Image: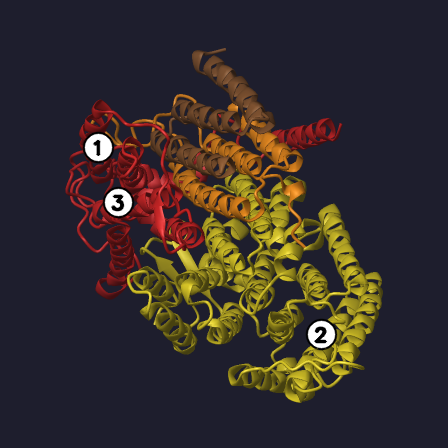
Chain colours: A red, B orange, C yellow, D brown
Amino acid sequence: MKKILGFILTIGLGLLIIFALDSNSSFDDFGFANLSNRVSSHYITKGSNVDIIFGETVNPESGPANIVTSIVVDYRSFDTLGEVTVLFISALGVSLLLGSAVTQKRMSLDFKPNFMLRVGSRALFGIIIMTGVYVTLHGHLTPGGGFPGGTMIASAMLLLYLADDQFRAKIKGFKILEGVAGSLFVIIGLLGLVVGTYFLQNFLPNGTVGDLFSSGIIPIVYILIGLKVGSEISGVIDNFLTEEEAQ
Amino acid sequence: MIQYAAILLMMIGLYGLLTNRNVIKIIVSLNVLEIGLNIFIISIGFVYDGIAPILTSTNNSSALIFVDPLPQALVLTAIVIGVGTTALGLAIVKSIYSKYKTLEIDEVEEQ
Amino acid sequence: MSAILLIAIPLLAAFLSILSKKVAPILLLLVGAANIILLMFMPSEVINIGGFALPFGINLFLDSYARIALYLVNGLFFIVTLLNVVEYKKLSSILLVALAALNGLLLTGDLFNLFVFLEIAGIAAYLITTTNKKPLSTFNYLVIGTVGSSLYLFGLIILYGMFGTLNMMDMIHEIQTAGVAYGSLILPFFLMFIGLGIEAKLLPFNAWVKGILKHSNTLSGPMIASVYAAAISLMFGRLIHNLFAFEGKLLTVVLILLVAGVILGEAMAFQSKKAREILLFSSISQACITVLLFVNGIIVWAVYLVIANALSKLVLYLVINRATKETKSDDVDDLQGLFANNILIGIAFTVAALSVMGLPLFVGFVVKLNYLTQLAVAGQLAIVGLILVASLVEGIYFVKLLIKLWYSKDKELNIKFDLPYKAVFAVITFLILLFGIYASPLDSLDNDIDSIQDQIGVIYHG
Amino acid sequence: MTTIDSIMLVLSVLLLIIAFLAVSEKKLIKSVIFLSALSMLSVVAFVVLKAPDVALTEAVIGSGLVTALFVFTLLSIKKEEAK
C-alpha cells in the first residue's frame, strides 16, 4: 500500500515537472535546442569569425578538434580539476574504510582458474592497456580522453585480479603515481599563472587543429588524468577485493 | 520523447529511495536517479539532424549544425562524480555489514 | 596574489600528502595557516581561470562578502584542525581537500563549478563523519546529500536550457534582461533551493543531521556544525540574494517552510534530554533563521548571525564532545556538574550559550536586536513574533541545560581540558564579549558588504 | 514519425521498464544486473543523442566499473555470511 502511494506520488511529481517544462516558453523544446542563444556557440566556433578547418587552422583559441574535450580540459578545466579531486578523495575514503586493517589478504573467488584463462587474460591485458593508452592520447581528437582511458587501464588490472586468485598489484606504487600525477596537474595550472597570467592557462602553442601533437597542454593534462584515474581506480578495486586476514 | 523518459527515470529512482529499506537497493536507486539526470542533461542539447560535436576532415565549425557540446562536458563530470559517490557508498555498506551483520536499515539500531 | 591560491595550494598539498604519512599533518597545519595569511594580500577582484572571457571560462569572485566568509571559514577550520590533528592524523589529506572545497564554494562564480565543489565538500564531510563510527548515519548523510546535489544540478540544467549560460553573473544578467515571467522560474529555483536546503540543514530536508551530530566527536561536531554550516549558509545566502530573489507565491512557500523549521527545531530541542541533541536542534533552527534573513534581504545581519553562531557552536560542540569522550554518554544527567571543577570552561560555555540565546552583553544580542528591528521595518511582524516565541523557548532549555551543567548534588565530574582548548575558548569568549559590548564597528559596517549586482553593473554597463 | 523518433520511443519504454525492475527487484544480485543493463541502455541513448564522449565514458565507468564494484561488495558480504 505504502509502495503504491509512493509510486503514484513520485510519478505525479514527474508529470508535474514535465508539464511545467512544457508550458515554459523560454525552455527549448526537445530536439530544437537553440545554440545561438547559448555559450556553446562560442565553444563550437572557438571564438573566431573564420571557419575552423580540420588540419588547416593554426593556433585557434582552443586547440582540440573534439569540442567536448576543448570544453572539458580547456574552457572549463577547473571543473576537471574538481572532478579529479572527487575521484581522489573517494578513493582515499575507500582505502580509509576498507584498507585500514593491518593484515590483509586477497579475497578468494571460489573457483580454480585454468591455464587458458590465466594465459588468455595476460594476453588481453596488453590489448586493453593499449586501447586505454590510445583513448587517452587521442582524447583531443576523437571521443575518449583521460577518464575512460584511465578506467580502461584499471579494468585491465581488474581482469588480472579476476583471472588469478593470488594476484595483488603493488598498491604502494599506485599511491606514488596518483600523488605525483595529481600534483603535476596542479603544478601545470600554477605554471600557467607564472608563465602567463591565469591559472590553468594553456601556455603552449595550440598548433594545427587535428594534429596529434597539438592543442598545447591538453594532451599532457589528459595523460596525467589517465594515469591518476587508472591508479586510483586500481587502488579502489584492490581495496574491494581484499579482506581482513581471518583469525 | 526521451527527455520525458529521463525525468520519469529520475522519479523512479526517487521512488526507489523512498520505498527501499535495503542499503544496496538504495545505492541502486541512487544510480538510477543519476542515470536519469545524465540523460536529461544530454537531451537539453540535442538538435534534430545535428552531428556529434567533433571537427573532422569533412566537418568544419560552420558547415554543419552540431548538438550542444556543453551538456556533454557537464555529464562527463557528473558521471565521474557519480562513480566516486557510489564507490564510497559501497565501502560504507561493507562497513555497515561488518558492524551490524545486516543490510536492512530497519534491523539496525543505531542510537 | 590571486585568490586561486586558496584552492590550488590545499589541493596541491593534498595530492602531495598521500606520498608521506608523516608530513601530511604538518602540511595540513601549514596550509591552514598560510591560507589565512595569504588572504590578507589578495585584492578584491574577478579572477578568470584559463584566461577566457567571462561567460565562457570559469571565474572566481573575491568581494568583501567572500572575504568575510573566507576569514571566518579558514580561521575556524584552522582552530578545529589544530585541536584534532594529533588524534585524527589519518584524515589529514581529506581535511586538506575539504579546505580547498569550502574555499571553492565561497569563491566560485560559476554555478556548475559550485556543484562540483559542493560534491567534493560533501564527500569530505561524509568521510569526516566516518570517525563517529556510526556507518549507518554516514550512509544516510551520503544518500541524502547526493540526492540534494542532484536536485540542485537538475534545477541548474533547466536554467541552462532557458538562458544558455552557467556563469552566475551572466545568468543574473540574462534573467534581468530577458524579461521572463517569474512563473517559469519557480520550478528551477525551487529545485535548487531544496537541493541546497538539504545541505544547509533546513528542517523539512534535514533527516541526516540527527544521526550525524548526535554521535559527533571533537572533529566531526565542530566541523559539521560550525565550519561547514557557516560556509554553506554564506554560499546559500549569496545565491538567495543575487540569483533566486524570491517573490510571489514561491516567497510565501519558502517563508512558511523556514518559519516551520525554526519552530519545530526549538520544540524538538525543548523536548530533548541529551546535550548534543539540544545543540543540534538549536543549530537547525538557527540555520533556518539565517536563511530567513537572507530571503528577506537583511544581508548584513544574516552574515553576522552566521559569524556569531559559528563561534558559539564551535565552543558548545567542543566542550560537550570533549566531555562525552570521557563520560561515554551525553545525557544531561550524566554530565551534571561538568563545570564545577572547570570554571573557565564553564564561563566559555555559558557565554556562548547566552550569545546564541541573544542576551545583552553578547554579540548575539546585537545581531538579534538589529535583525528583528529590520524585519519589523520590513513589515514581517508575524515572523518577528514567531522568532521571539522561539527565542523564549530556546532561553528556557538553554538555562535548564546550564543549571544542570553547573550544579550537581551527588557526584563530581573531573574532566581535564588541555591547554589548546582553553586558549581557543578564551579567544572566542573574548570575541563574543568584545563585539557584544563594543558594537559600533558592526553598526558602521552596515551595507559595506557589496554584492554581485554592482559587479554585473561594472561588467555589462561599464 | 521518423526513424530516430521511433528508436527513441522504444528506448524510452525499455529504459523505464528496466529502471522499474532495478528498483523493485527483491534479489540484490538481479537488481544490480538490471542496473548494469540500464546503464548499457543509457549508453545507447547517449549514442542516439549524438554524445559519443559520454557514451564511451558511461560504458567504461558506469556499466563496467560500477557493476564490478557492486558485485564485489555482494560477494564479500556473501562470504562473510557463510562464515
Q: Residue C428's spot in the image, x, y percent? A: 59, 82
Q: Quadrant of residue C341?
A: bottom right
Q: Residue A224's spot in the image, x, y percent? A: 25, 49
Q: Is residue C46 left or right of residue C198?
A: left
The answer, for residue C95, to whether it is visible in the render is yes
Q: Secondary structure at mark 3?
A: loop
**Closer to us: mark 2 or mark 1?**
2
Query: Badge 1: how crowded within 10 Å, few (<14), some, or many (20+)?
Result: some
Q: Chain of mark 3?
A: A
Reading the image, the residue beneath label 2 is C335
Reading the image, the residue beneath label 3 is A169
C119 and A124: which one is in front?
Answer: A124
The residue under label 3 is which amino acid type? Ala
Q: Earlier in the sequence, mark 3 or mark 1?
A: 1
A208 and C67: which one is in front?
Answer: C67
Measure how far apart labels 2 and 3 are at the Cα level. Answer: 50 Å
Q: Residue D9's spot in the image, x, y percent? A: 51, 16
Q: Is residue A158 above or below residue C357?
A: above
Q: Are marks 3 and 1 on the same chain?
A: yes
Reading the image, the residue beneath label 1 is A125
Measure how far apart labels 2 and 1 are at the Cα level. Answer: 61 Å
